[in-house]
Amino acid sequence: MRPEKKLLVEEINTHLDKSDYMFLANYERATVVDIAELRSELSKEEAEFHVVKNNILKVAAKGRGYPEIDEHLAGQNAIVIGGGNPSGVAKILTKYFDKKEKMDVKVGILSSQRLNKDEVVSLSKLPSLDSLRAQLLGLLSQPAQSLVFVLNGVPTAMLNVLQAKADQGE
């Protein structure tokens, strides 16, 4: 491989090291303004949009042991990587691409698993990581809260009986 290509593959690998997911997007009909707008949206999730050469991405993906994506490497492609919330990034991509109707997610890779377009859309419908943590915390605290109410019920009932008896004597 020529030194220039090795340098480009290393650059792609540097980008891919930033997260455990990657979305491959077709940006063929997008304008510079569209891409700038998308990059701005993605920055909210600390994600990045990078235009890549198909053959360089193919070499980098094979070197990383990614699932086969060769059939999607045609036309003008970009990768979306970075940030710790793949669900949030997928949500931004699907919402933005539906609105603009100029770009499209072709395929995704999440923890070395290949996601087709429908699976990326399903990923985008998941709640955010913070919401999932809050739901889990709520589920974990619910039994303890119920136990406190039960344990508190006996003394409260006893106090009510004593109060009724005191009221009766007056």
Image (cartoon, helix red, strand yellow):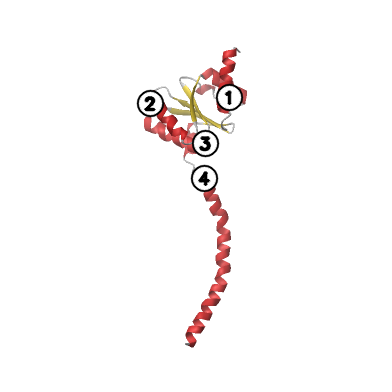
The residue that mark 1 highlights is 13
Q: How far apart in space, not on screen, are marks 4 and 1 (Cα)?
A: 29 Å
Q: Are marks 4 and 3 in contact (CB under 8 Å)?
A: no
Q: Please indicate, yes or no, whether residue 152 appears anywhere in the rendered image.
A: yes
The amino acid marked with disc number 3 is Pro
Q: Position of residue 11 (x, y in %)?
A: 56, 22
| Residue depicted at x 60% and y 23% | 62
Q: Secondary structure at mark 1?
A: helix
N-terminal-most mark, 1 or 3 = 1
The residue that mark 4 highlights is 130
Q: Position of residue 69 (x, y in %)?
A: 54, 24
Q: Are marks 4 and 1 in contact (CB under 8 Å)?
A: no
Q: Secondary structure at mark 2?
A: helix
From this view, report whether residue 137 is shown above or below residue 24. below
From this view, report whether residue 76 is shown above or below residue 91. above
The outermost residue toward the bottom is 169
The residue that mark 2 highlights is 33
The amino acid marked with disc number 1 is Asn
The residue that mark 3 highlights is 86
Q: How far apart in space, not on screen, are marks 3 and 2 (Cα)?
A: 24 Å
